[in-house]
């Protein structure tokens, strides 16, 4: 089979970027566009091993595992190690589903239009097939993650950076907090204004403070008393950690402010 380098590199660049976006969504990890593109470019370059002489299966497996760790390290950061391995595992899992979907579509459309060498699949497929494959991989991965989600019964702490202030707050993981932003799909952390008094004292009220931040929106919340709107925004930095540990994991979530007193910050269980 003739292998076209532009098709090989561009298709892998697109696929790796889409898979990184899906891994970021599954692990609720922020992903900057430039880091995602840089990591996807490294992934596309790793596909060039299809041009090398045949390598032993163990070498191919080790190379793929190390490539996944390197790609996720570039995309999400190399520390903490536990989070790096978590994102790499998510990326690998989605990649397996994606490869299966593309392989199936290639076999159905053009049975002779694919080539496997050194654990790299080259499929003579259209952009539409790639789009369908990545969509299927993302959909199946998100569906399985939501079905398998469980709540760790531990106390947590929430690390927030709001402007120049760093705050460390007590937090509770709650399966009852299923709030999501209707626009971005991000989970929503609910935090009492009493915990943010040092930051809020510079503003007239909580809503004014939220409006001054990036990603402001009003989030509808249903309670026994009815539906109310909470001001929410994207903090400059949000990370969760177990109360008995010091290593934290950055999360991609909105922060909603409530005037309820005496309660810790409520983190959706999906972020744990």
Image: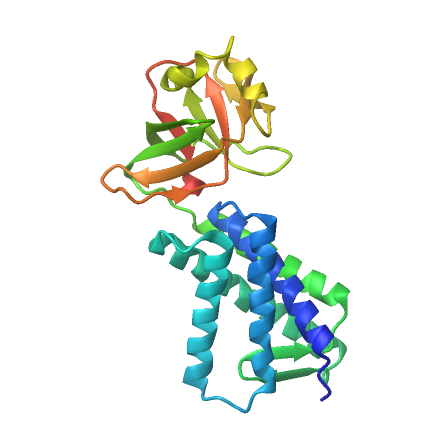
Say left or right for 120 vs 124.
left
Q: Tell which residue pokes out farthest to the front in this image.
A: 164
Residue 165: tell me if it is visible.
yes
Residue reaching furthest to the top: 204
| Residue 238, quarter of the rendered image | top left
Q: Residue at x 59, y 62 (%)?
A: 40
Residue at screen point 54% across, 27% down: 233
Q: Is residue 261 above or below residue 130?
A: above
Residue 99 spot, x, y in % from top left = 59, 70
Classify residue 241 as left or right of residue 44: left
Identify whether 214 is placed above or below 40: above
Which quadrant of the rendered structure holds the C terminus?
A: top left
Quadrant of residue 181 within the rendered picture: top right
The picture quadrant where one finds residue 139 is bottom right
Residue 143 is at least partly visible in this image: no
**x 52%, y 50%: residue:** 24
x, y percent for residue 204: 51, 8
- Furthest-left residue in view? 244
């Amino acid at each position: 089979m003739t292998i076209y380098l532009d098709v090989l590199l561009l298709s892998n660049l697109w696929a790796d970027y889409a898979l990184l976006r899906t891994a970021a969504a599954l692990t609720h990890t922020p992903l900057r566009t430039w880091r995602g593109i840089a990591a996807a470019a490294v992934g596309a370059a790793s596909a060039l091993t299809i041009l090398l002489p045949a390598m032993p299966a163990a070498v191919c497996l080790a190379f793929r595992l190390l490539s996944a760790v390197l790609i996720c390290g570039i995309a999400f950061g190399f520390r903490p190690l536990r989070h790096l391995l978590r994102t790499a595992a998510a990326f690998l899992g989605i990649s397996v589903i994606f490869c299966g979907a593309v392989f199936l579509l290639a076999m159905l459309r053009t049975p002779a239009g694919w080539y496997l060498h050194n654990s790299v699949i080259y499929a003579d497929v259209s952009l539409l097939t790639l789009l369908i494959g990545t969509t299927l991989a993302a959909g199946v991965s998100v569906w399985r993650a939501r079905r398998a989600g469980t709540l760790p019964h531990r106390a947590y702490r929430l690390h927030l950076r709001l402007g120049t202030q760093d705050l460390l707050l007590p937090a509770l993981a709650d399966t009852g907090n299923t709030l999501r932003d209707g626009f971005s799909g991000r989970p929503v952390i609910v935090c009492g204004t009493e915990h943010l008094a040092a930051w809020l004292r510079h503003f007239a009220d909580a809503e004014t403070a939220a409006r001054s931040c990036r990603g402001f929106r009003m989030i509808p919340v249903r309670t026994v008393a009815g539906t109310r709107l909470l001001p929410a925004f994207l903090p400059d930095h949000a990370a969760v950690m177990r109360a008995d540990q010091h290593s934290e994991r950055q999360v991609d979530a909105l922060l909603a402010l409530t005037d309820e007193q005496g309660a810790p910050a409520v983190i959706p269980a999906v972020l744990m």
